[in-house]
Amino acid sequence: MSTRRNFFKNTAKMGLAIAISATILGDLSFAQTASKVRLQFKQVTLPYAYDALEPNIDAQTMEIHYTRHHVSYLKAVNEAIEAEKIEEPSEEQFLANISKYSVKARNNAGGTWNHNFFWESLSPKSSLPSGKVLRLIEESFGSFDAFKQQFEVAATTRFGSGWAWLILDDSGKLKITSTPNQDNPLMDVAEVRGIPVLGLDVWEHAYYLKYQNKRADYIKNWWNIVNWKKVAERIG
């Protein structure tokens, strides 16, 4: 009788041990699965109406740019992440390692990130830079007017499609640079790397309906809608 009781007791202990082990293994399996959830880019909500930036950027251009061009980049980068099994912890880390991935991943990650950044760089209630932003601009370029002139040169002379950028370098100084296509200064392939604080899209789709081939006019009018408050937030 004692042997039988021991048998059932030991069997119960084994069952409990198996149940605990299964729970632990299940938790580990869930944790491993959760850790492998892949990064998904998202489109920011446009912080103003399509016509809010007129006459500097027209409503039709804004709507097409946001709902078609940007959405196509978003769809393509998320496809690339899934197809290539990319497991970066953040968009910025993905961009920092972009040379490891395909042309599709590079172009569309840049296109998605750059446009999210661009929309938030614009405001229908623009004002001139002040405080720390203005001080850094003056320290880095001599004056606000000198900065504008240098930035316009970078944007105007970017051959073909691309972007002009104002960035913070490792020393905390502001620099102007430009990148081709949908590259940006966060990427490990960029000639000049740094933290973007302001960016201008000089692809023709950003201005052609209103300005045709007059990129310089688009750039000059763009100053009227720069969100300097956002630039200040980025600089910190």
Image (spheres, rainbow, N blue to C red):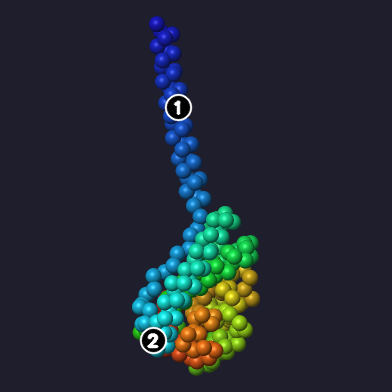
Residue where numbered disc 2 is placed: 54
* Vertical relation: 75 (above or below) 118: above
* Vertical relation: 224 (above or below) 22: below
Residue where numbered disc 1 is placed: 17
Mark 2 surroundings: few (<14), some (14-19) or many (≥20) residues within 10 A:
few
Quadrant where the C terminus sits is bottom left
**Residue 223 seen:** no
Mark 2–mark 1 Cα distance, whole angstroms, equals 69 Å
* Amino acid type, callout 1: Ala
Quadrant where the N terminus sits is top left
What percent of the width, then of the height, locates residue 14?
A: 45, 22
Which image quadrant for residue 109? bottom right
Residue farthest along the top direction in this orientation: 1
Camera-nearest residue between 32 and 209:
209
What percent of the width, then of the height, locates residue 45?
A: 39, 70
What percent of the width, then of the height, locates residue 59?
A: 40, 82
* Amino acid type, callout 2: Glu
